[in-house]
Image: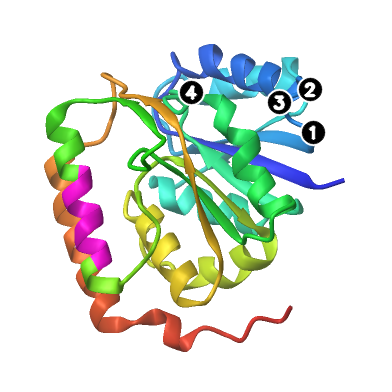
């Protein structure tokens, strides 16, 4: 049976973790998710009570592991946990569960059964259902239009915190990713397409988190710099051949 790592990267989420992890675990244990799985809480250098909360959840709930990473950066946490994973498919979602979990089996099925290498939640797909401010929607559409113009990519939403990758593809793509923060998602998808991997957009139901830690304008600046770095550096040209 296909095995799946569900990574939840966290930084100072002592309040969100005890609310979201039991909900996620109950969903994965239901008949809606027909795969073997484990949840990995990837704590990237939290300074609040997140370590104690994460360890307690791992001790009291089956199929939940806690990993402490002594370096800040969501992208770094994902690279480390995904590269060390023994599972067939690695995935992640944001701790606030803004993306409706009903889309998660579709995300995994795309890789396990449909021949895709990468699958990503899309809030910009025509079948997506999104509750979000006008400003954030406009910024997201503008950013993704910029990606398409610069790289001629086909995926519709680079930034949704809801992704899955086959272990084979992850082992080849992740060493090429330089960003350790929020641009990680965009870099992953651009590299995946440029390396010839099949990427599937999965429409999602999504509700904006009013307590989001994302600093919009700082992230926009980081993203633009990242796009220019990829455009000029073209790191996919130095990728090792796919061994499959």
Q: Is residue 34 visible?
A: yes
Residue 186 or residue 50, whichever sits in front: 186
On residue 34, which mark appears?
1
Question: Could you tell me which secondary element the residue under label 4 belongs to?
Answer: helix
Q: Are marks 1 and 3 in contact (CB under 8 Å)?
A: no
Q: Residues within 10 Å of mark 4 (few under 14, many from 20)?
A: many
Does residue 36 lie above or below 150 as drawn?
above
Question: Residue at the spot x=64%, y=50% of the render?
Answer: 110
Task: Check disc 4 and report the residue beneath it.
Answer: 50
Q: Which of the numbered marks, if any, corresponds to residue 31?
A: 2
Q: Residues within 10 Å of mark 3 (few under 14, many from 20)?
A: many
Region in magenta: 140-148
**Comes first in the chain, label 2 or label 4:** 2
Query: In which quadrant of the rendered image does the C terminus lie?
Result: bottom right
For mark 3, what is the residue?
28
Q: Give how far apart the Cα atoms at labels 4 and 3 are.
A: 23 Å
Label 4 or label 1, whichever lies nearer to me, is 1
Was residue 220 drawn as part of the magenta stretch in this picture?
Answer: no
Nearest to the observer: residue 55 or residue 121: 121
Residue 236, given in percent of the width and then of the height, sits at: 44, 81
Labels 1 and 3: the sequence-earlier one:
3
For the question of whether residue 85 can be seen, the reply is no
In-image side of 150 versus 122 (left or right): left
Q: Position of residue 238 (x, y in %)?
A: 46, 87
Asked if disc 4 and disc 3 are in contact, CB closer than 8 Å, the reply is no
In the picture shown, does residue 215 fall above or below 102? below
Dot 2 and dot 1 residues touching (CB under 8 Å): yes
């Amino acid at each position: 049976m296909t095995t799946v790592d569900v990574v939840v990267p966290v930084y100072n989420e002592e309040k969100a973790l005890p609310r979201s992890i039991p909900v996620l675990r109950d969903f994965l244990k239901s008949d809606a998710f027909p795969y073997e799985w484990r949840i990995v809480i990837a704590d990237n250098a939290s300074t609040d009570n997140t370590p104690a909360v994460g360890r307690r959840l791992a001790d009291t709930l089956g199929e939940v592991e806690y990993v402490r990473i002594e370096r800040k950066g969501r992208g770094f946490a994902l690279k480390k946990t995904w590269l060390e994973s023994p599972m067939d498919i690695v995935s992640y979602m944001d701790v606030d569960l803004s993306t409706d979990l009903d889309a998660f089996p579709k995300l995994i099925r795309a890789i396990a059964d449909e021949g895709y290498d990468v699958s990503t939640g899309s809030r910009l797909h025509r079948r997506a259902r999104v509750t979000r401010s006008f400003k954030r929607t406009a910024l997201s559409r503008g950013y993704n239009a910029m990606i398409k113009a610069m790289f001629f990519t086909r995926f519709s939403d680079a930034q949704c915190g809801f992704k899955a990758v086959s272990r084979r593809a992850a082992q080849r793509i992740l060493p090429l990713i330089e960003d350790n923060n929020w641009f990680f998602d965009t870099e992953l998808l651009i590299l995946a397409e440029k390396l010839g991997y099949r990427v599937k957009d999965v429409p999602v139901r999504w509700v904006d988190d009013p307590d989001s830690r994302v600093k919009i304008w700082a992230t926009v600046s980081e993203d633009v710099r990242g796009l220019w770095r990829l455009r000029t550096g073209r790191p996919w040209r130095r990728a090792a051949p796919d061994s499959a």
